[in-house]
Amino acid sequence: DSGVTQTPKHLITATGQRVTLRCSPRSGDLSVYWYQQSLDQGLQFLIQYYNGEERAKGNILERFSAQQFPDLHSELNLSSLELGDSALYFCASSVSAGTGAYNEQFFGPGTRLTVL
Amino acid sequence: TQLLEQSPQFLSIQEGENLTVYCNSSSVFSSLQWYRQEPGEGPVLLVTVVTGGEVKKLKRLTFQFGDARKDSSLHITAAQPGDTGLYLCKGGTSYGKLTFGQGTILTVHP
């Protein structure tokens, strides 16, 4: 158990819909990272927040957005969903503000999103 | 666009054999991390290398970062069934760019 929690574990929805994925980092960690893992694209970095502020941006689509709240939990919002958005979405946390190149990140168990 | 080519994609070996997984790029990375992921779980960090030519050992695992910081390898000696999993390399830059290899699915048969 990494100490990072993600809800829900599974999510099934239809094209065009909007969903919100939630992540609670490990106690004491200020950085939250979001990743998408799919069979064709592999694991891709989406975005990082540190203490409520956006820190680094990866391959995040404009239809996706994220935020980190004062209690440090984070939400990833996915809108106008397409079939290709079906994937595992991971949240990771670390104590440092670093960009993720050097830090040890602790990954949650993921949310499996299925878009029908 | 930075790409990390990871090979082989699949590896199926017998217990006790040695193996090497490679990550190669035409781009320079500030760091290279290796992760192991088991089904239904998130990746777990194995090692971070940051200096060109650096070699790190973790029990039966040996990690190397290329001199030019464009490639890396993971060598496992005397593989065990518990080593089975998905191995991922991740290249990072100081300005926040993170790039993953496609992964190597390793199966070690008893």
Image: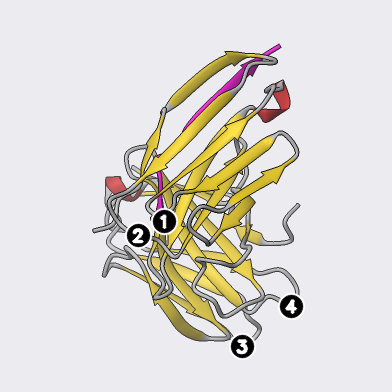
Mark 2 belongs to which amino acid? Val
Per the rendered image, the range of residues in magenta is B99-110
| Residue bearing the label numbered 1 | B69
The relative height of residue B45 versus residue A69 in the rendered view (above or below) is above
**Residue A109 visible somewhere in the drawing:** no
Point 34% across, 49% down: residue:
A14
Point 55% across, 61% down: residue:
A91
Q: Residues within 10 Å of mark 4 (few under 14, many from 20)?
A: few
| Residue bearing the label numbered 2 | B28
| Residue bearing the label numbered 4 | A28
How far apart marks 1 and 2 lie (CA) works out to 5 Å
Q: Which mark is in front, 1 or 4?
A: 1
**Residue B106 visible somewhere in the drawing:** yes
Mark 1 belongs to which amino acid? Arg
Q: How many marks?
A: 4
Q: Give x and y (percent) for residue B65.
A: 50, 50
Point 52% across, 29% down: residue:
B20
How far apart marks 4 and 3 lie (CA) works out to 13 Å
Q: Give x and y (percent) for residue A113.
A: 45, 48
Chain of the residue that carries numbered disc 1 in the rendered image? B
Q: Are marks 3 and 1 on the same chain?
A: no
